[in-house]
Image (cartoon, rainbow, N blue to C red):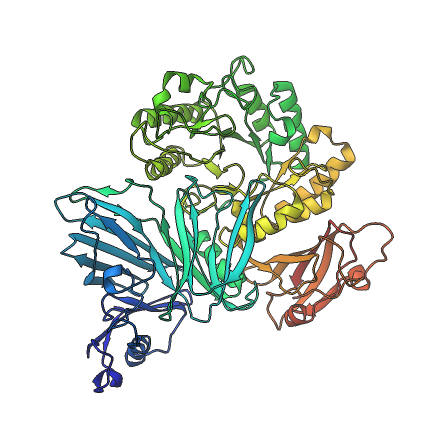
């Protein structure tokens, strides 16, 4: 067991901290290079005194010393006993920061104070049972270290009283080192999700909330605190992610009593969590990672996620999505021609996007009526699917099961199935409203139509979209808020579809990347990273999405030469190089492309197929210290025998020709051959001397000294393949 009892010299001394026990009980969880040390004897409740680097040499005595050394002394003007940052800090303990739990009984009995009632633990997980007999509440707090060292927390609150208890807030807290003086999170909007922002971590609270009924395009995928100047390669950093697809809240807090913490959980709307007598609510998992640099932190997420039993194992199929090729202009002849062109370049999955169902000629009507439009498809989708499958490609279909247009049979017949809190409907978005999947009848209707589609047609893949935020999301005029219930219903529906159709894959799309979280990704197979396919916009988007999401689960597609979302003109080489380091696909009308261009596209598809095993298993590396205007990133194989790096010229740089770039992440003493496999540089540039015959360097030299990249114009990229010499 991991519960350690010890006695320390400090506790024997007459000057020992008031209230300390001579028997210090320590919980030490260890796994994946991470240690979590919990002082079970701390007053008033257990306290996490270490989360981060593994502590393999610690003895029971030294662990007890670590716990005692973390306890704060009394100071003038303060309480007679300075409270610890406990696993469940609340106001009655004297904690003046954000409480982990808040609630009341009809406006009364707001105060809580929890004592440790029991511990069940093994080497890498524990359940702490906490109780407050006066408040008539119990909390079951789960702490778990995953195989890669991710620290998971969630809590179950149970009402043991006879009257209802209204739970207002429930957060999981993660202490971070006091020298973590800089914060990183992400923000954005449609077409620019997960743009980074930094600020000083000063006294007070930095709070980020999502009230959109989904994480939202402006949500932070990670809230991180680290040593000033931390980057991707260096600097100790800790971060948390809320694995939940509804409203959520994360905060970083620094107190005048010397505590720094990150906390997160579900954001509960008024009345969403009224616990009747004997009822309980379980929070979503909040997951913490740490590392020396963000590469290390993100690798823990990637490694653990890849180890799940349900993680997609087979090679990620090269996907063509029809949206930017045909939009709503569906015809069998046109789509067959597109399928022919897709097969010619090596596509393995053909996805029919919006416009196939009843009444759907534009985005103003039909949404919610999930049956094939017989006016466009008199023989159903069978002729197209048969044509696609005859080419050896899988067939995928776009759906948006949570939404309805007011101009639809569903909305006309069942206006009571629309999420709304008042007699008037919420403001529309994309001319649609949200179907209340927490309504059993609405759920059964949508579920039956999806199951019927999957039964009739050999559909291998659903592109599951979610194109608007939830506004005023109630179960009807004057009824209760339903974001939580709706989110749980979505999870249940996806789980049931997967159980009934085990080979089905599902993509989470939400106006692009507005629902990117590990709650939805625990039951789907990839996310659509952004509706923006502009490769320059995608550089930051994919970099910061990848802090949590493994690259093989991020949809990254080739775009047409004129980008749909930005109208920027880009080269095939740039678009392909940026798309390589993810789940590669195409968003382009290939019937408009001549034979020579298709041959070049086929070459990139062949390369993507060749390296996708590396993308799905390797370690992502983002390189710090590059010149302004240059981006260097790569993926290194798990055994460090090979790697792929891209060097992208975003803008001009101060040096011309540019200075050397480093390629870190390889084994220091191993010799590697560096080969240019794709170069997008323009005419008139003389060839690099080393690139003519390749160059052999050690992993250490590549990491600390580097090499000269080719001279490139802005918006050009070079792909380097690195292989170990035998």
Asked if one can make out residue 96 in the rendered structure from this viewpoint, the answer is yes
Is 62 situated left or right of 578 in this image?
Answer: left
Where residue 557 appears, x then y in whole percent?
Answer: 62, 41
Viewer-proximal residue, 266 or 682?
Answer: 266
Where residue 251 appears, x then y in whole percent?
Answer: 41, 56
Viewer-proximal residue, 601 or 521?
Answer: 521
Tell which residue pokes out farthest to the front in this image.
Answer: 77
Where residue 95 appears, x then y in whole percent?
Answer: 29, 63
Residue at 50% across / 58% down in the picture? 298
The answer to whether 613 is drawn above or below residue 410 in the figure is below
Classify the position of the C terminus by image quarter.
bottom right
Tell which residue pokes out farthest to the right in this image.
Answer: 684
Residue at 42% across / 34% down in the picture? 471
Where residue 248 appears, x then y in whole percent?
Answer: 39, 47
Is 187 situated left or right of 32 in this image?
Answer: right
Is 487 situated left or right of 374 in this image?
Answer: left
Is 518 situated left or right of 536 in this image?
Answer: left
Residue 572 quadrant: top right
The answer to whether 302 is drawn above or below residue 340 in the figure is below
Residue at 33% across / 59% down in the picture? 144
Viewer-proximal residue, 343 or 375?
Answer: 375
The total of numbered circles placed on residues is 0
The answer to whether 72 is drawn above or below residue 517 in the figure is below
Asked if one can make out residue 282 in the rendered structure from this viewpoint, the answer is no
Classify the position of the N terminus by image quarter.
bottom left
The answer to whether 366 is drawn above or below residue 87 in the figure is above
């Amino acid at each position: 067991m991991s519960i350690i009892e010890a006695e320390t010299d400090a506790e024997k001394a007459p000057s020992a901290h008031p209230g300390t026990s001579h028997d210090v009980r320590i919980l030490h969880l260890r796994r994946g290079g991470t240690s979590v040390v919990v002082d079970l004897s701390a007053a008033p409740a257990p306290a996490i005194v270490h989360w981060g680097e593994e502590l393999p040499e610690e003895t029971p005595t030294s662990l007890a010393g670590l716990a005692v050394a973390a306890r704060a002394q009394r100071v003038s003007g303060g309480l007679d006993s300075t409270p610890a940052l406990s696993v469940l800090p609340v106001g009655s303990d004297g904690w003046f920061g954000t409480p982990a739990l808040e609630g009341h009984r009809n406006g009364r009995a707001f105060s809580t104070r929890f004592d440790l009632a029991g511990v069940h633990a093994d080497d890498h997980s524990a359940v702490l049972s906490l109780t407050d007999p006066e408040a008539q509440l119990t909390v079951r707090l789960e702490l778990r270290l995953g195989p890669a060292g991710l620290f998971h927390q969630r809590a179950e609150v149970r009402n043991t009283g006879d009257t209802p208890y209204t739970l207002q807030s429930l957060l999981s807290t993660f202490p971070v080192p006091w020298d973590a003086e800089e914060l990183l999170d992400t923000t954005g909007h449609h077409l620019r999700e997960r743009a980074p922002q930094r600020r000083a971590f000063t006294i007070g609270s930095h709070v980020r909330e999502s009230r959109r009924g989904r994480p939202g395009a402006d949500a932070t995928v990670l809230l991180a605190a680290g040593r000033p100047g931390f980057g991707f390669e260096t600097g100790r950093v800790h971060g948390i992610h809320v694995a939940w697809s509804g409203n959520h809240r994360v905060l970083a807090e620094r107190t005048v009593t010397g505590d720094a913490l990150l906390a997160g959980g579900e954001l509960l709307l008024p009345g969403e969590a009224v616990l009747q007598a004997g009822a309980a609510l379980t929070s979503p998992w909040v997951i913490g990672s740490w590392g020396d640099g963000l590469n290390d932190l993100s690798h823990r997420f990637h490694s653990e996620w890849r180890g799940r039993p349900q993680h997609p194992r087979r090679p990620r199929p090269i996907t063509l999505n029809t949206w930017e090729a045909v939009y709503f202009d569906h015809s069998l002849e046109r789509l067959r021609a597109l399928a022919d062109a897709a097969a010619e370049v090596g596509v393995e999955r053909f996805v029919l996007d919006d416009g196939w169902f009843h009444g759907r000629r534009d985005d103003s009507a039909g949404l919610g009526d999930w049956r094939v439009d017989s006016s466009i498809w008199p023989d159903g989708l069978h002729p197209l699917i048969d044509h696609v499958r005859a080419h050896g490609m899988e067939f995928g279909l776009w759906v948006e099961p949570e939404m309805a247009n007011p101009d639809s049979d569903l909305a006309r017949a069942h206006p009571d199935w629309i999420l709304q809190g008042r007699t008037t409907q919420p403001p529309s978005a994309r001319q649609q409203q949200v179907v209340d999947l927490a309504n059993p009848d609405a759920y059964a209707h949508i579920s039956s139509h999806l199951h019927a589609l999957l039964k009739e047609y050999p559909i291998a893949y659903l592109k599951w979209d979610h194109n608007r935020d939830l506004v005023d999301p109630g179960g009807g005029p004057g009824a209760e808020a339903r974001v939580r219930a709706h989110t749980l219903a979505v999870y249940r529906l996806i789980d049931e579809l997967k159980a009934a159709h085990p080979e089905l894959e599902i993509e989470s799309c939400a106006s692009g990347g507005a629902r990117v979280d590990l709650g939805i990704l625990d039951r789907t197979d990839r996310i659509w990273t952004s509706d923006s396919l502009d490769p320059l916009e995608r550089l930051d988007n994919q970099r910061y999405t990848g802090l949590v999401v493994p690259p093989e689960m991020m949809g990254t597609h080739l775009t047409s030469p004129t980008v749909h979302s930005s109208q920027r003109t880009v080269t095939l080489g740039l678009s392909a190089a940026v798309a390589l380091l993810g789940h590669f696909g195409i968003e382009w009308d290939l019937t408009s492309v001549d034979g020579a261009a298709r041959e070049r596209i086929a070459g990139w598809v062949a390369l993507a197929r060749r390296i996708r095993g590396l993308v799905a298993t390797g370690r992502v590396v983002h390189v710090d210290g590059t010149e302004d205007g240059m981006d260097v990133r790569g993926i290194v194989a798990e055994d460090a025998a090979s790697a792929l790096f891209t060097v992208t010229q975003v803008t001009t740089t101060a040096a011309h020709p540019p200075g050397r770039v480093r390629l870190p992440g390889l084994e220091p003493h191993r010799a590697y051959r560096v080969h240019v496999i794709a170069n997008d540089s323009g005419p008139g540039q003389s060839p690099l001397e080393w690139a003519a015959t390749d160059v052999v360097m050690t992993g250490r030299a590549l990491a600390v000294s580097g090499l000269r990249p080719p001279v490139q114009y802005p918006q050009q990229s070079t792909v380097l393949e690195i292989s170990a010499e035998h």
